[in-house]
């Protein structure tokens, strides 16, 4: 739908006429010129009058058109689209994902094929992120150090894309759980946060790096009203072929479940264990229940500004008018 944001601007339409009628004209001193061949020039009188009248009319029309175009641009013409729903501010949710070397362990199955823990996390977490319409989502990646990969935003598709681009080794080989929690808390405090602030921490190991102990970070989270849900990644057993046949090993022996349980309990969250792809999918479904998405939505009608078109035409006509002013009149030569 086309409309003007400032239609009252058109009240200025008669302003040039008022200036022309009521403004005092500037006085000019006329210089006397003696023309010894006046009789010869008298024949050009009628031609000059016709040319002057013609140019006055064309210049006046151009000026009126330029004035109308400038008023149209000033009135801010806009083209409004169909109303769209905008996400409401539900909660601030930061997801901290472990990308240390141990996440390269192939003890997960996706569609019947063995895959690494990180690829399984990406496969399931991408859908979870895109479902959280109404929440501000952020992404922290951690290994030996923790890094903010995506700040809090309503653009869930972009956050999911950043997750899919994460690679092992980007943050170092070790696991800095305490530092990941500390960085997440800092980012939640820096911005104007919603009433609900949540951290979802996914890891397959124990804290082996960083200056912050996980339980200290959990205490800080509790003091700042940040809830932490922890998820332990990794299968309980894995068959490995050896010289004497197959043997069973526990690939998750380094997982510090005790600390993860303490972190979640301290902050009012919950600990989950993801032993396979299906269990991680169920965890995210349960998180949707524990931290429901805000359903209230606001509506916004997108608008497209059109002022540049009348403004551009006005500038072109102004250039044309200036060109006409500087071009000499085409008169017949008179032999004197």
Image (spheres, grey):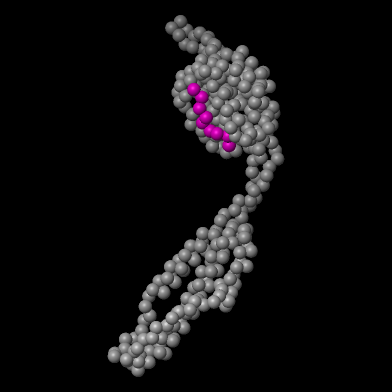
Above/below status of 96 relative to 5: above
Residue 47 sits in quarter: bottom left
Q: Residue furthest top?
A: 244
Residue 156 sits in quarter: top right
- Main structural element of the magenta stretch: helix, strand or loop? strand
- Horizontal side of 325 relative to 280 (left or right) equals left
Quadrant where the image shows the N terminus: bottom right
Q: Residue at x 59, y 57 (%)?
A: 79
* The magenta stretch spans residue 149: yes
* The magenta stretch spans residue 258: no
Measured from the top left, where is residue 259 in percent x and y? 60, 14
- Horizontal side of 127 relative to 322 (left or right) equals right
- Horizontal side of 285 relative to 119 (left or right) equals right
Give the magenta-colored segment's residue range. Answer: 145-153
Looking at the image, which is closer to me, 219 or 98? 219
Q: Is residue 101 visible?
A: no
């Amino acid at each position: 739908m086309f409309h003007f944001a400032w239609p009252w601007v058109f009240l200025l339409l008669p302003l040039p006429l008022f200036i022309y009628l009521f403004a005092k004209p500037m006085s000019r001193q006329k210089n006397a010129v003696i023309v010894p061949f006046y009789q010869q020039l008298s024949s050009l009188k009628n031609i000059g009058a016709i040319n002057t009248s013609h140019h006055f009319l064309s210049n006046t029309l151009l000026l009126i058109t330029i004035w109308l175009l400038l008023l149209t641009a000033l009135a801010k013409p806009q083209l409004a689209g169909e109303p769209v729903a905008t996400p409401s501010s539900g909660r601030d949710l930061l997801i901290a994902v472990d990308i240390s070397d141990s996440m390269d362990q192939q003890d997960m199955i996706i569609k019947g094929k063995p895959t690494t823990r990180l690829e399984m996390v990406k496969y399931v977490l991408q859908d979870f992120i895109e479902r959280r319409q109404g929440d501000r989502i952020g992404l922290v990646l951690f290994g030996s150090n923790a890094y903010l990969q995506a700040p809090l935003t309503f653009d869930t598709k972009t956050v999911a894309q950043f997750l899919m681009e994460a690679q092992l080794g980007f943050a170092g080989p070790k696991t800095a759980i305490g530092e990941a929690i500390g960085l997440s808390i800092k980012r939640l405090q820096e911005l104007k946060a919603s009433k609900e602030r949540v951290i979802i921490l996914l890891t397959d190991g124990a804290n082996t790096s960083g200056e912050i102990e996980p339980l200290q970070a959990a205490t800080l989270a509790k003091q700042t009203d940040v809830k932490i849900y922890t998820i332990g990644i990794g299968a309980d057993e894995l068959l490995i072929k050896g010289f004497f046949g197959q043997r069973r090993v526990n690939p998750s022996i380094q997982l510090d479940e005790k600390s993860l349980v303490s972190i979640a309990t301290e902050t009012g969250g919950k600990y989950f264990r993801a032993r396979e792809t299906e269990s991680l999918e169920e965890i995210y479904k349960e998180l949707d229940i524990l931290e429901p998405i805000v359903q209230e939505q606001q509506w916004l009608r997108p608008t497209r500004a059109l002022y540049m078109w009348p403004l551009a035409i006005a500038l072109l006509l102004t250039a044309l008018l200036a060109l006409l002013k500087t071009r000499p009149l085409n008169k017949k030569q008179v032999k004197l």
